[in-house]
Image: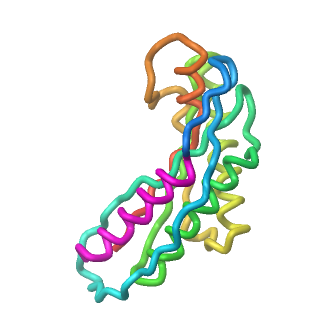
Amino acid sequence: MKNLLKVVLVFALAAGLTACKKNVKDDANADLTAGTGAEMVLEETDVTSNVPSQEVSLGVVHFDLDKATLSADARKIVEANAQAIKAAAAMASYQVTVEGNCDDRGTIAYNIALGQKRADEVKAYYVRMGIPAANITTVSYGEEKPVCYEASQSCWAQNRRADTLLSVK
């Protein structure tokens, strides 16, 4: 199980570092660009059914203000995440959770709904990439789980995101 976790962590880190290079155009419209990643060779690992789940965060997808559509750069991040999910699926049972998040502007109800739309959009793209819908759950946290607490455009851009968590057993 430790080898599987190491493989998933290495793949997630590689996807995050090579496919998610940050390119801040200006504070009002920060977005992510993706580069190319190196191919990885994964070793098969014995996995037992009574091993506890391990959770790994994959690449973060950012959204424009009041939007739930995936940009070209965001699709590249989801595609890299899908590769990591498929690699884990080849060696173990897994579950994916997509968490939709918003900045703190707007009403609570609006942000919960927008966060859900963002999570659903990422899930739909994973399904198009071949990840079974039955293995993906979505949740919206609205504005409740910020990663940045300043009242600035660049900070709000960091909070407009969908996080993908991969749980492997």
Q: Is residue 59 left or right of residue 109?
A: left
Above or below — where is 141 with respect to 168? above
Q: Is residue 163 magenta?
A: no
Q: Nearer the viewer, residue 25 or 84?
A: 25
Q: In the rendered image, which quarter is residue 46 located in?
A: bottom left
Position above or below: 87 against 143 = below
Answer with left or right where residue 114 lies relative to residue 166.
right
Please name the residue shown 56% across and 53% down the image. Answer: 19
Residue drawn at the location 50% of the way across and 58% of the way down? 15
- Determine whether, in the image, residue 98 is placed left or right of residue 91: right
Magenta segment = 1-20
Residue at x 36% of width, y 62% of height: 9
Is residue 169 placed above or below 100 in the rendered structure? below
Quadrant (top left/top right/bottom left/bottom right) for the N terminus: bottom left
Q: Nearer the viewer, residue 168 or 45?
A: 45
Task: Give the residue at x 70% y 60%.
Answer: 125
SS assignment for the magenta stretch, majority: helix
Q: Position of residue 23 (x, y in %)?
A: 61, 34
Q: Position of residue 37 (x, y in %)?
A: 55, 62
Q: Is residue 19 magenta?
A: yes
Image quadrant holding the C terminus, namely: bottom left
